[in-house]
Image: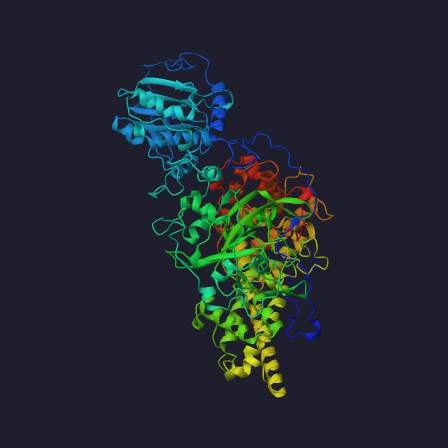
Amino acid sequence: MPAKRKDPNAPATLPTRRSARNVAKETSYNEIDEEKPVKAKAAAPAKKGKGKKTAEKEKVDGDATDAKEEEKAAEEEEAKEADPEEPAAKKSRTGIAVGDALPDLVLKDEDENEVKINELKNVIIFAYPKASTPGCTKQGCSFRDNYPKIQKAGYSVYGLSLDTPKSQKTFKTKQNFPYHLLSDAPNGQFLAWLGALKVGKKITRSHWVVDGEGKIEAIEAGVAPLDSSKKAMKTIKAEEEDGEEAKDEDVGVASPIFPTDPDISFSNPPTPHLRLMRRFATSTITRMTSASARCTLAELPKSHIFTSNLPADPEIPSPQASKEAPAELLRNARAVKGAIFTWVKPDTSDDYELLATSPKALHDIGLKQTEAETEEFAQVMSGNQIYDEHYPWAQCYGGWQFGSWAGQLGDGRVMSLFEATNPETKERFEVQLKGSGKTPYSRFADGNAVLRSSIREFLISEHLNALGIPSTRALSLVNLPSKFARRERIETCAVYTRFAPSWLRIGSFDIHRWRGDRVTMKKLADYCIEHVFGGLDKLPGKRETDTEEPNRFERLYREICARNAKTVAYWQAYGFMNGVLNTDNTSILGLSMDFGPFAFMDNFDPSHTPNHDDHALRYSYRMQPTIIWWNLTRLGEDLGELFGAGEHVDEEKYAKGQWSEEEKEALITCAEGIIERAGDEYKAVFLEKYKELMGKRLGLQTSQETDFDQLFSNTLDTLEKYGIDFHHFFYRISSVPVFSLSSDDDFVQAASKILPPEEDKSVHYAGHTREDAVKGLVEFLQAYKKRLETEGSTDDASREKRMKEVNPKFTLRNWVLQEVIDRVSKDGERDILQDVMTMALNPYDPETWESLEITKEDQERYCGTVPRSERGLQCSCSS
């Protein structure tokens, strides 16, 4: 076994006091919260067999990507595959003809109910190549939209394909089809009888009308998606909906994510920049909850509690002053004192493209899914429209960056639009635009965000939340194709919308201590107690070891410490590395935020840092618990006077710092004691949460004192020694039949399946052989089995179910992100962004990926072995 080592996650000796000599003079660091992969990559080659439609690189509001042209091309391609025989409507390739009776076959519908084919009468049966693909969606939705007319004519409808019942169920549910879908899997016997099954199990899009005696009344083979329902209705003499021919733009893409929402309608042609978003509406996550309490953006309850309770920039004291202020006051860097924020206004752009939204974020903030297709949503999320009664603002804060004081920082390219309250849950969020232009806090930067880094932050925010890791959220991503920014190279800009209950951070307190502004410090602390954490009764109270009641600021500090301890425990348990953990990137709510050169662990290496500029490994995986505590110690120093001021905290004596030497020493002693006790509490909370999460990931139902040393530590030692992929390890051991292992050969075979296939020569085991790694995993499995047996259960099936609920199949790796960036920004693809978002939102449930445009091959590739050249990818702080 590997030599025993200390747990890599345990905090190091926790500092509690810092000399004033450590305060460095203000530096010119740019806001560090983004990244750029250091490794230069060639443009992604064209992906074969993906069936992707790539977007033109012209402006989205042009005519180059007209939906009708795409549909026409698709129909021409389908026409090539159609049966050349004629007349198609009278005879199929196998010789069935009008008047033939349906065969004696039994198929299953989407609910796996058996359907006897020869008992079907007065029905339209339509065949389609593959569920949830664009053409088949249009065909199915056309029948859906005209179903009342078909029923009125005395007919019903059945869809037919080679898809499994499960896939048919997903297709039907998502598109709200009122009719059944039949599965002819795996052999296509009915499709073959109908003459619609071609070589290679390809299906000719067709439909058949069956009369009241169960005989073929009409045959249409090689039909275009939108012609199928029209021709069938003509046969049965049913009027098409509204008496008009369906238009390409209005069918198929209209299928709602939440089918019961009465306001989901696409009766009007979309504005050009929304064309892509309408297609995305058919390929997102499944129904979440009732839509009854969700609303439009205009209806969403908004507030301005933050700006009503905290001091504004004295140079711009009101929204009206901001409207009238000269550009240099709003945009040029300057010191902002005695304030928490500045009233600002976003840049506008005539050329913008709404690339993607998060359906889960729309739901959680309280918006209807259809709101993402409205003009108002696109205008607000691009910065072109603001609500005058809730004027935007940018926060002022400072920060310690890489251990040195960086002076005033602030929202240099971020503007808060408004506070929004979910009507159903009553949760309040602060909504921000990132990349929205310069503010007084921009320093030497340009106020822009580039598309590359915005894609990264957009996807990772939602993925962390889906994994269960506390995180800020991502609502939408807007491309600005005519706006560019210089980073290491010239790049396209973007605006990214994000939200969180609060964007306050440790740096929000740092700046006021640095300036000696006790009044603003106290206002901010009291605001946090009342409006961020919900009141004093929501904060930790007196401990058993306390000799007196802690004051409100100590209780605030302890809550902030505990929340951050839990979050860093999640990072360590799930192999996530933030990359930049400065005090201006550390949330008082313990949220993962301001994502820069972040990464998920590939091969387990506790010394790995995803930050190319982090030469001292300050922000490596191993150091994260200690660095978060270092930041919290700075917060304790910020609040030090409030800790010890006692009865004088609301008096002028505190505001002016009129302390005697004896009182100063007492204040320091008090603050040091509080920080030290909070450090002990931080470590205890961290370890408790870490043990809980690791136990769940290993399928344990109980906790034992020996787990940390004998199981968790030894497991990590094995992963590190042989360079085993951190995420694949946990996912693959879920499926190992541990209780069935008895012989040496059983253990060897099981251990081998945890590793990549033997023929994969790209994998190197940290200088060892694959056989060595197998031996190491055998030792793990033997110890693991013994530990599981102590719980009394020997049920592998229930253990696997538990483990797959907490061990994701898909983890958003850096190499996947870079491929998505290349395919969007270089190849002009758009579907890939929403598809990967769907995988990111459903990392534990691969069944939800079945209807995606992205191929199964790519799905498995994104979940499989990390390409050798992409392992341990590091990023710089360019954004």
Q: Residue at x 35, y 32 (%)?
A: 144
Res. 442 image quadrant: bottom right
Q: Residue at x 38, y 32 (%)?
A: 141
Q: Residue pushed farthest top?
A: 86
Q: Is residue 537 above or below residue 362?
A: below
Instruction: Note whether residue 104 is visible.
Output: no
Residue 101, x across and y down, in percent:
32, 17
On screen, residue 487 versus residue 102, left or right, reads right
Residue 711, x across and y down, in percent:
60, 58
Is 873 in front, or is 454? Answer: 454
Type of colouring: rainbow
Instruction: Note whether residue 654 is visible.
Output: yes
Number of numbered markers: 0
Res. 114 image quadrant: top left
Quadrant location of the N terminus in the rendered image:
bottom right
Q: Is residue 547 above or below residue 594?
A: below
Q: Residue pushed farthest right?
A: 767
Is 213 in front, or is 456? Answer: 456
Residue 840, x across and y down, in percent:
52, 46
Q: Residue at x 43, y 42 (%)?
A: 373
Residue 657, x across and y down, in percent:
58, 81
Is 840 in front, or is 530? Answer: 530
